[in-house]
């Protein structure tokens, strides 16, 4: 299966359990992989035969910046739902949300959540 990757998309948003996360906000990074058949686009070189990267990015941006979630697990699920809604040709999506400023009880470390979702059978 073919794939489109969008990596290290950065957004400032207000997700998290703690009141200061809702008040101050922080940066979130998103990696996305969409699986779909790109054979037509590869043969035709026509824009209409692929999924618009800008449209995918805008769907992610809207989800990250216009909603508030306590958990990045829920944020990742909402991004997956939004991306699957962008174009019916997308069969599977993998979303990884990185929260570099996650409150950890140690001096250094990173947190991310990754989910994989398939388009529901029609």
Image (tube, rainbow, N blue to C red):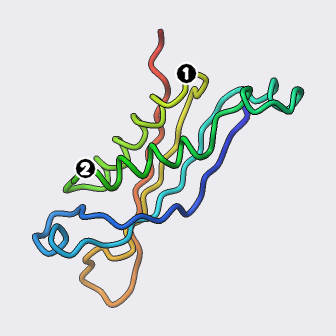
Q: For mark 2, does the 10 Å Cα neighbourhood hold few (<14), some (14 to 19), or many (20 or more) residues?
A: few
Seen from the viewer's position, the closer of residues 42 and 17 is 42
Q: Is residue 47 left or right of residue 74?
A: right
Q: Identify whether 35 is placed above or below 13.
A: above
Q: Which mark is residue 88?
A: 1
Residue at image position (16%, 67%) is: 22
Q: Which mark is residue 40?
A: none
Q: What x and y, as percent, mark residue 17?
A: 15, 63
Q: Quadrant of residue 41?
A: top right
Q: Is residue 92 left or right of residue 76?
A: right
At label 1, counting other C-alpha atoms closer than 10 Å, the crowd grade (few under 14, some 14-19, many 20 or more) is few
User: To which residue does mark 2 refer?
Assistant: 67
Residue lying furthest bottom in this view?
107
Mark earlier in primary sequence (1, 2): 2
**How far apart in space, not on screen, are marks 1 and 2 (Cα)?**
24 Å
Residue 62 against residue 82 in the figure, above or below = below
Q: Residue furthest right?
A: 43
Pick the front one: 24 or 119: 24
State which quadrant residue 27 falls in.
bottom left
Residue 122: where, in percent of width, then height?
47, 9
Q: Residue at left 10%, top 70%? A: 19
Q: Secondary structure at mark 1?
A: loop
Who's the residue at 81% across and 23% down the image? 40
The N terminus sits in image quarter: top right
Query: At which x and y percent is residue 51?
Result: 64, 34
């Amino acid at each position: 299966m073919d794939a489109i990757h969008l990596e290290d998309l950065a957004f400032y948003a207000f997700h998290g359990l703690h009141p200061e996360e809702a008040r101050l906000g922080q940066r979130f990074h998103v990696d996305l992989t969409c699986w779909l058949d790109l054979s037509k686009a590869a043969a035709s070189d026509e824009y209409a035969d692929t999924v618009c990267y800008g449209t995918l990015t805008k769907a992610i941006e809207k989800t990250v910046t216009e909603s508030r979630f306590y958990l990045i697990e829920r944020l990742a699920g909402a991004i997956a739902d939004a991306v699957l809604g962008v174009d019916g040709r997308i069969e599977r999506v993998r979303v990884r949300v990185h929260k570099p400023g996650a409150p950890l009880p140690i001096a250094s470390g990173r947190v991310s959540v990754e989910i994989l979702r398939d388009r529901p059978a029609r």
